[in-house]
Amino acid sequence: MKYKDLDPVLNTPVRLAVVSILVKMRQADFGYLQETTGTTQGNLSHQLKKLHEAGYIEIVKTQKGNYPQTICRLTKTGHTAFERYVDTIKDYLHL
C-alpha cells in the first residue's frame, strides 16, 4: 500500500486540535480555543491565521460588551480536509 501524505495544514498539534474542536462545535471563541488547546495567545493567533489562509476556518471579529471577541467557525473546505486527514490516518492503521 502506498501511503498518502498527511495534510501539512492539519499535521500540527494545535491546528488539528482547533479543527477537531470546531468539527464538534458550531463555533468557538478565541478564549475557549486557547483554554482547550493549552497554547499561548501568540501561538494560537498564528495557527488560526494559517487555518484561515488555507480556507479551513472563518474568523469573525465582534464586540462583546466593551471587549473584542474573536469567533472561529469551520468551513466546508475545513470539514472536508479534516475528514480526508482522518481517513488517511485510518488507512495508515489499516482500519
Image (spheres, rainbow, N blue to C red):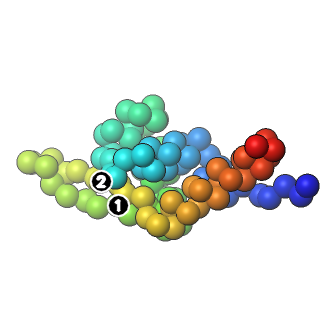
Label 2 with label 1: CB-CB less than 8 Å: yes
How busy is the neighbourhood of tag 2: few (under 14 within 10 Å), some, or many (20 plus)?
A: some
Which numbered disc, 2 or 1, marks the residue that appears first in the sequence?
A: 1
Q: Nearer the viewer, residue 43 or 76?
A: 76
Mark 2 to mark 1 CA distance (whole Å):
6 Å
Q: Nearer the viewer, residue 92 or 54?
A: 92
Q: Nearer the viewer, residue 68 or 85?
A: 85
Kindly identify which residue carries mark 1: 59
Q: Secondary structure at mark 2?
A: strand
Q: Which mark is residue 71?
A: 2
State the residue at coordinates (51%, 61%): 78
Q: Is residue 9 visible?
A: no
Classify residue 77 as left or right of residue 88: left
Quadrant where the C terminus sits is top right
Q: Residue furthest left?
A: 65
The disc labelled 2 sits on which kind of residue?
A: Ile
Q: Position of residue 28 (x, y in %)?
A: 33, 47
State the residue at coordinates (35%, 61%): 59
